[in-house]
Amino acid sequence: MSLTREAERFVDDAAGLTRPAKVVWCDGSAAEYDRLIDLMLRDGTLLALDPRTHPRCYLHRSDPGDVARTEQLTFVCTRGRDDAGPTNNWMAPAEAKATARAYLRGSMRDRTMHVVPYLMGPPGSPMSRTGVMVTDSAYVVASMHLMTRVGRVAIQHMRSDDDFVAGLHSLADLSPDRRLILHFPEDKLIWSVGSGYGGNALLGKKCHALRIASWQARREGWLAEHMLILGVEDPEGRVTYLAAAMPSASGKTNLAMVVSRLPGWRVWTLGDDIAWLWVDPQGQLRAINPECGFFGVAPGTGPGTNPHATLMVRSNAIFTNVALAPSGEPWWEGLTPEPPAGLVDWQGKPWRPGGGPAAHPNARFTVHASRCPSIAPNWEDPQGVPISGLIFGSRRSAVVPLAFEAFDWSHGVFLGSAMSTETTAAITGQVGVVRRDPMAMLPFCGYNMADYFAHWLALGPRLATPPRIFRVNWFRRDADGRFLWPGYGENVRVLKWMVERIRGSARAEETPVGWVPAPGALDLEGADVSAERLRRALACEPGEWRAALDELDGFYAGFGPRLPAPIRETLADTRRRLGTR
Ligand code: GTP
Ligand code: SPV
Ligand code: MN
């Protein structure tokens, strides 16, 4: 298999810097995957799980200091600092390369450098994009096999010699002190050194399909978003497609695979993390999933919460940092009500109840999308699916109602830009702190977010019928800290309301922040939710909102005059509607 001349030059340069003992070109075949697994079983990178209960499933224990994305070590290295904007870490390209070069020099000595050509997006789609990454991690290559389309199909998609995003990845010594995740969008280039963790190391995912792709999308007039894609089928068999942005570890995988509690309704999965969206010649918004696998959060995944994911990881999956039962079965908090006896924790140490979580809170599974019981029959359609609604969701114990609808496109863009969320274990740092996370893209937008808001606003007028924009929050709590809404499978009731809003039939009440489901408009047939708890889940409290909007002022101020006027004006309108007391 031959790469383009440009790709070969990139590989040669990378090898010159990192000095691998051997260079291997990957073809993406099943035989190659098997060879990698064998290699990792032999050198201890992987442990085989019980082949009777979990055929072709493996456990990987990462370095204990390398278990989540490290945003403080992630940089957007544009020539101009303002092009990265105030929400990104920035380093000048030359300085970034000089620093990383010191970590990368000779870092693959005694190791194999794998060259991985990969395709993001369905084969044959005009939206699909290619990358070529080199890595000294067999775990990364095997994961890329599950998450992207590796091999000839990628090279066939290159429209010119340099039509690929180049990615250089090395584990180096895994030290956080010598770790950098660098993006050079102007050069379609990624350098990642010092981490083997998913979002830091599987360069097709957050680095390419979000940070570099969002930069390209702005120039070319489309969107690269941290969104799931799903189809809601009604009892007549009509399917409505929605895309939903939610921050890391905040419910995308769960919603994408939700098993309906409403008779006759079902949900089809098309993607759980990333969507590329564009406007077709008819003015219809369409979406593809650039990935072909799921890198999902294990804790909290069980038969009661996410039965499809629980089934899907019973074979052909790689688990990272889960606990292990003596039977050779994987375990994590939420899989079963009681932990099996004799567990070892995610670090391989004997675990005792009360001794902290057995699985790391950001333990994950990696599995091909075709394994998902609810995968949509058209999930790889090169033309994508038409999107009728967009959802912005976040994790807020207070303030934000369970579900509401924006007044129009630009109000919806404002609601997305105003999103904040409580942090999770998907990033290193404190968990549960409220931080701004516009459109769930704070860590993933590869350019100035003021320009990103402007780009979103400009898309509206290009759409024949702009999708409805909804805001959701499954995580609102009562005074005792209990969730007001049961979530998970019950979320399908909210999806049904959205579909009916899109069709014009569901009732809603106007509040200062948007249209909230009217009493009785959410189908609660068979649900165990009291009218009082639902009322509190849906309530819009003007006092809480006024305080929340004051915090938003400071965030918007960081963008200076670059913040689009409609965002500022919508904030002012919202304040007016909320009144002063
Ligand atoms: P990334 O892969 O990190 O981008 O995350 P994601 O958005 O796909 O998150 P995921 O669906 O894996 O959810 C992560 C956590 O949120 C898990 O602990 C879930 O149990 C929890 N969660 C998901 N949906 C709900 C819900 O409806 N209600 C509640 N209370 N928790 C939920
Ligand atoms: C996230 O953190 O949003 C993830 C996991 O989806 S990672 O691929 O590590 O970014
Ligand atoms: Mn994600």
Image: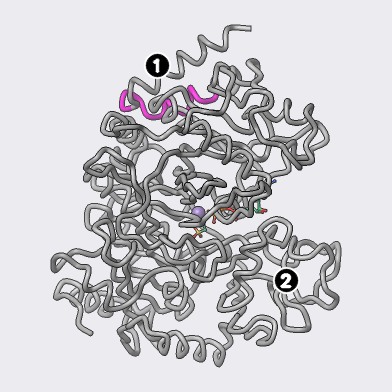
Residue 488 seen from this side: no
State the quadrant of the N terminus. Answer: bottom left
Left or right: 357 as drawn, with respect to 580: right
Comparing 60 with 177, the one in front is: 60
Comparing 131 with 301, the one in front is: 301
Residue 577 seen from this side: yes
The answer to which quarter of the image holds residue 2 is bottom left
**Residue 236 position within the rendered picture, expressed as x and y whole percent measured from the top left:** 53, 46
Identify the residue at image location x=61%, y=75%.
Answer: 61
Q: Which mark is residue 569?
A: 1
**Residue 346 position within the rendered picture, expressed as x and y whole percent measured from the top left:** 69, 71
Type of the residue with mark 2? Trp
Part of the protein shown in magenta: 551-562
Left or right: 423 as drawn, with respect to 36: right
- Figure check: 573 above or below 365: above
Color theme of the render: one colour
Of the image marks 1 and 2, the number of the one nearer the N terminus: 2
> Which residue in the structure is indicated by mark 2?
331
- Figure check: 356 above or below 185: below
Q: Secondary structure at mark 1?
A: helix
Type of the residue with mark 1? Glu
- Look at the numbered disc 1 and say if its residue's Cβ is closer than 8 Å to ligand 1: no
Q: Secondary structure at mark 2?
A: strand
**Residue 242 position within the rendered picture, expressed as x and y whole percent measured from the top left:** 46, 44
- Look at the numbered disc 2 and say if its residue's Cβ is closer than 8 Å to ligand 1: no
Residue lying furthest top: 580
Q: CA distance from mark 1 to mark 2?
A: 50 Å
Q: Is residue 553 magenta?
A: yes
Identify the residue at image location x=47%, y=32%.
Answer: 503
